[in-house]
């Protein structure tokens, strides 16, 4: 299989995408995947790359400049562009690809025009209860990622104790299920066949999962053999207690 020129990790929060992105970047052959188009707002995109709207004659020119910067950053020192795309960012992102390439008939054609030959990776988490708990705990505690040695990698707010909320967990489960359905509908509607990977498989055997992804991208899978594991799981006794309590309260075996 010839190497692709780009790939997009189609995912939702707390599905292991930070682990996968950092593993891929560490191989030195699979770009520097990141949420280059995270907030669905052009001004936020411009600020991410220290660009100003007033420097461009039109919005289309501004969008084109953001894409150029994102592609350069997302390639790193490699020939392959990597992108993590959360479902909440999807609609606005695809609108901008259509703005850049208005004469093309469908989403795959627009993605290829924007990034070259593109593969999709669908990274999902099968256990939606655990995913919801992980997401809510991160929001409450402010801690989103830490290194294997316990060092904080990403903190978004000051530490606060997590508080169990049955209704909030149920609502978040429904949101994550809806995100999965939306991805599936898009894949089916556009006749797309992504590389499929679960959080559970990635967490259990990260090196094996990485090699499978590299093989799917058409690059040397051995480049992932000795990559260090860059992040640690945040699940703890609180997470487990919440899961047991939620199942008990909802009659789930």
Image: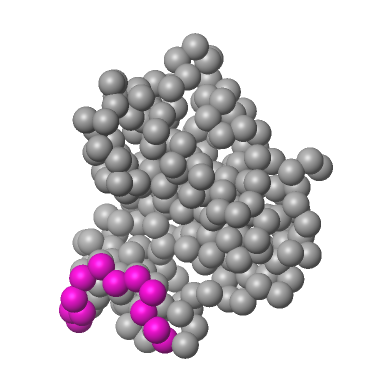
Q: Nearer the viewer, residue 166 or 223?
A: 223
Q: Residue at 39% x, 37% y: name it.
A: 66
Q: Residue at 30% x, 46% y: name it.
A: 50
Query: Please, what is the dominant secondary structure of the magenta stretch?
Result: loop
In the rendered image, residue 135, in percent from the top left (x then y), is placed at 33, 64
Is residue 156 inside the magenta stretch? Answer: yes
Q: Residue furthest front?
A: 55
The quadrant the N terminus occupies is: top right
In the rendered image, residue 197, in percent from the top left (x then y), is placed at 61, 55
Magenta region: which residues? Answer: 150-161
Left-right relation of 26 to 85: right
In the rendered image, residue 125, in percent from the top left (x then y), is placed at 50, 59
* Residue 192 seen: no
Q: Residue furthest top?
A: 103
Residue 165 occupies quadrant = bottom left
Relative to 124, say whether 47 is above or below: above
Q: Residue at 41% x, 62% y: name it.
A: 14
Q: Nearer the viewer, residue 188 or 63?
A: 63
Relative to 112, say whether 213 is above or below: below
Q: Residue furthest right?
A: 1
Is residue 197 inside the magenta stretch? Answer: no
* Residue 245 seen: yes
Q: Residue at 38% x, 52% y: name it.
A: 176
Left-right relation of 159 to 109: left
Residue 253 occupies quadrant = bottom left
Relative to 67, say whether 164 is above or below: below
Left-right relation of 157 to 211: left
How many marks can you see?
A: 0
């Amino acid at each position: 299989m010839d190497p692709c020129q780009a790939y997009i990790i189609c995912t939702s929060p707390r599905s292991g995408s930070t682990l996968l992105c950092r593993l891929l970047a560490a191989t030195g052959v699979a770009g520097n995947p990141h949420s280059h188009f995270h907030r669905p707002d052009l001004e936020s995109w411009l600020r991410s790359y220290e660009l100003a709207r007033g420097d461009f004659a039109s919005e289309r020119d501004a969008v084109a400049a953001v894409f150029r910067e994102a592609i350069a950053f997302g390639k790193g020192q490699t020939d392959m562009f990597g992108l993590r795309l959360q479902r909440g960012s999807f609609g606005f992102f695809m609108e901008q690809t259509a703005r850049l390439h208005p004469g093309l008939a469908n989403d795959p054609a627009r993605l290829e025009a924007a990034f070259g030959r593109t593969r999709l990776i669908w990274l999902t988490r099968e256990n939606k209860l655990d995913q919801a708990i992980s997401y809510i705990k991160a929001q409450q505690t402010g801690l989103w990622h830490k290194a294997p040695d316990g060092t904080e990698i990403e903190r978004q707010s000051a530490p606060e104790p997590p508080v169990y909320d049955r209704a909030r967990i149920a609502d978040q489960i429904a949101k994550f299920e809806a995100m999965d359905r939306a991805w599936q509908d898009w894949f089916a509607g556009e006749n797309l066949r992504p590389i499929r990977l679960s959080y559970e498989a990635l967490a259990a055997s990260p090196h094996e999962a990485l090699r499978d992804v590299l093989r799917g991208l058409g690059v040397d899978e051995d480049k992932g053999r000795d990559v260090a594991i860059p992040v640690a799981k945040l699940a703890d006794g609180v997470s487990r207690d919440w899961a047991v309590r939620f199942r008990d309260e909802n009659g789930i075996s």
